Amino acid sequence: MHDNLITLALKLVFEQNDSTQDQDEQAELRCAVRCAYYALFHMLSRQCADFFAGEDPSQRSRPAWVQAYRGLQHGTVRSRCGNSNFINRFPLEIRFFAEKFVQLQKARHSADYDPEARFVLESVLTTIDDAASAMAAFMTVSEKDRRAFVVYVTAPLPR
C-alpha cells in the first residue's frame, strides 16, 4: 500500500493541467502531502504487523495481523521519533526515517487542519521524495534494528 500512496501523490502533482483553478491545485497538493505522510505510516504499520503477527499470511492469524497493523498510534510514533534520548541509539537510516516522520506529520497536519496553508509544487515534490527516501533508508537496516524500532514505537518505555 505504501508504494501505491507514493505513486498516487506523484500522480496528483503531475496530472494537474494548466487550466486548474488555484483552489483545485491546492486541494491536489494537500492530498499529495497526505499521501506522502500516510505512505510512511502504512509502511511502519506493516512492519509492526509483520513483526507481531508474522509475515507469512499462511502462518499468521489474519485478525491478529490486522489488529497489530491498526494498533500503531500517530501521536506515539511522533513522540518517540522526536525523543533524541532514545532515537539516537538507532542507526542513521532509522534516525533519518524518524526525522522525516515528524516533518511529514507536521506537513500533513497543515494540509488537513490549516485552511490558510498554501502549498507550492516544489516543496510538495520534496515532501514526496523525503517519504520515499525515508522508507528506502529504513529498509536498508538490519532486521534486528527494524524490529527494535517497531518495539520502540509500540511498547511502553522502561522507567
Image (cartoon, grey):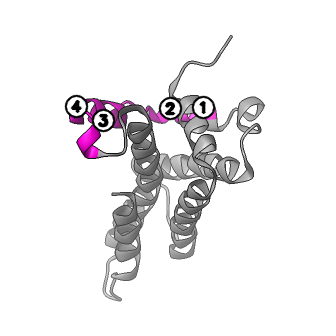
In the displayed structure, 24 sits above or below 87; it is below
Q: With respect to residue 156, does 153 lie above or below?
A: below
Please say if 5 is above or below 138. Answer: below
Return the residue at label 2: 75
156 or 142: nearer the viewer: 142
Does 58 appear in magenta? yes
Q: CA distance from mark 4 to mark 2?
A: 24 Å
Image spot of residue 148 (x, y percent): 60, 35
Q: Amino acid at mark 1?
A: Ser
For label 4, the SS is: helix
Q: Residues within 10 Å of mark 1 (few under 14, many from 20)?
A: few
State the CA–CA distance, disc 1 to disc 3: 24 Å
Instruction: Determine the residue positioned at 72% across, 31% down.
Output: 86
Q: Is residue 79 left or right of residue 105?
A: right
Disc marking residue 64:
none
Disc 4 and disc 2 in contact, CB within 8 angstroms = no
Q: Quadrant of residue 69?
A: top left
The residue beneath circle 4 is: 63
Image: magenta residue range = 57-80
Q: Mark 4 or 1 closer to N-term?
A: 4
- Disc 2/disc 1 C-alpha distance (Å): 6 Å
Look at mark 1 in the image and give the residue it sits on.
Answer: 79
- Residue shown at 37%/71% (left/top)? 7
**Badge 3 amino acid:** Trp
Q: Which residue is mark 3?
A: 65
Taking the view exactly as shown, the residue that stands out farthest to the front is 59
